[in-house]
Image (cartoon, rainbow, N blue to C red):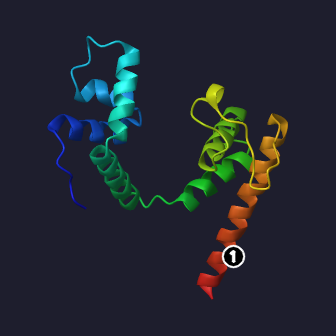
Amino acid sequence: MTIQKLTLKQEKFCQEYIILGDASAAYRIAFDAKNMKDNTVNVTACNLLKNPKVAIRVKELKEKQSVKYEITKDKIVNEYATLAFKKIKKYTAKDKRGALDSLSKIFGYMSDRPEKAAPITLHNHIHLETAAIDDRIGEMVNKVLRRAELRKRKEDK
């Protein structure tokens, strides 16, 4: 893991971005942005994330965090799938919706800004209407869970 030659403010931005997950908020903390318009901060923060040195550093920090907390995509998907598809009484509809939204983002069905999201087209070029998305996500999650279970069985043998 090599730290690229970043300015102190760029490094601070990277650290804050990992903590907050919000480039604009991280930019406001790392740089003197109190006199900047929100749109300017948003655009500048987005551009900063595209800077190759900054992008590499953010990736390094994310990887470090994943290792530290033993976060894997399988673990995340399994937890969301539990919330989204199992009938557990202590979870609310809001919890289930949040889990489904997160699964949708993980599998690329949805962007962070739904109003700008592209139509959903699967590999077999079937365009899905909104009502069918939940069913398709359920199928995808079940496939992932089945694969994880088969992998675990192979490892146990």
Query: What is the x, y in percent for residue 54?
Result: 29, 44
Query: What is the x, y in percent for residue 119?
Result: 72, 37
Residue at x-position 30% and y-position 28%: 27
Q: Is residue 116 left or right of residue 140?
A: left
Residue ranking furthest to the bottom: 157
Quarter of the figure with residue 115: top right
Instruction: Quarter of the image for the N terminus: give it.
Output: bottom left
Query: What is the x, y in percent for residue 56?
Result: 32, 51
Q: Is residue 152 left or right of residue 26?
A: right
Q: Foreground residue, 102 or 44?
A: 44
Residue at x-position 74% and y-position 63%: 143
Q: Foreground residue, 147 or 86?
A: 147
Q: Is any part of residue 73 visible from this angle?
A: yes
Quarter of the figure with residue 50: top left
Up/down of 97 relative to 70, above or below: above
Q: Which residue is mark 1?
A: 150
**Which residue type carries mark 1?**
Leu
Specify few, some or many for label 1: CA neighbours under 10 Å numbering under 14, 14-19, or 20 or more. Answer: few
Instruction: Quarter of the image for the C terminus: give it.
Output: bottom right
Residue at x-position 37% and y-position 57%: 63
Q: Is any part of residue 87 visible from this angle?
A: no
Up/down of 69 relative to 58, above or below: below
All told, the count of numbered labels is 1
